[in-house]
């Protein structure tokens, strides 16, 4: 087990900010990570990626690099040294809710 740091990812953009149109606002998320930059990666990895759904992105491209957690205009990262979460453990989301992508219903036998 690794000793890491606890980080809070907090939305900072106004709800009317047009950047939210391209990314989900998951509210506050708490992660265990190596650094503030790594905290953004850990949170982004917890989101659904188009490659894990039945959506059809062009050329099989991943969407993880477009996560709101990676945009410093949408989310800020603050180290939390006073919280109840142990720094011992794996890199992971320890609190908060990251909603899955909601896809339109389509027949199971639809052509892709």
Image (cartoon, rainbow, N blue to C red):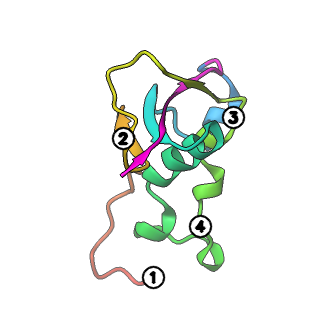
Give the mark nearest the N terminus, 2 or 1.
Answer: 2
Q: Disc 3 to disc 4, how far (Cα)?
A: 19 Å
Question: Start and end of the magenta stretch?
Answer: 1-14
**Whether label 2 touches label 1, CB < 8 Å:** no
In depth, the one of 7 and 18 nearer the eye is: 7
Q: Residue at x 52, y 38 (%)?
A: 24
**Whether label 2 touches label 3, CB < 8 Å:** no
Circle 3 residues within 10 Å: few <14, some 14–19, many ≥20: some
Q: Disc 2 to disc 4, how far (Cα)?
A: 30 Å
**Whether label 2 touches label 4, CB < 8 Å:** no
Question: Under tag 3, what secondary structure?
Answer: helix
In depth, the one of 4 and 75 nearer the eye is: 4
Label 3: which residue? 19
Q: Disc 4 to disc 1, how far (Cα)?
A: 17 Å
Q: Position of residue 80 (x, y in %)?
A: 49, 21
Q: Give residue 84's quadrant in the image.
A: top left
Q: Give residue 99's quadrant in the image.
A: top left
Give the mark nearest the N terminus, 2 or 3.
Answer: 3
Label 1: which residue? 112
Between label 4 and label 1, give the one nearer the viewer.
Answer: 4
Between label 2 and label 4, give the one nearer the viewer.
Answer: 2
Q: Disc 2 to disc 3, how far (Cα)?
A: 34 Å
Residue 88: numbered disc: 2
Q: Give residue 79's quadrant in the image.
A: top right
| Membership of 4 in magenta stretch | yes
């Amino acid at each position: 087990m690794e000793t890491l740091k606890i980080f809070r990812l907090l939305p900072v953009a106004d709800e009317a900010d047009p950047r939210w149109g391209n990314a989900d606002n998951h509210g506050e998320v708490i992660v265990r990570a190596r650094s503030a930059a790594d905290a953004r990666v850990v949170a982004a990895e917890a989101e659904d990626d188009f490659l894990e759904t039945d959506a059809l992105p062009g050329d099989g491209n991943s969407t993880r690099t477009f996560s709101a957690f990676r945009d410093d205009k949408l989310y800020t990262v603050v180290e939390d040294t006073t919280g109840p979460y142990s720094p011992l453990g794996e890199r992971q989301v320890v609190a908060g809710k990251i909603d899955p992508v909601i896809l339109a219903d389509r027949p199971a036998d639809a052509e892709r």
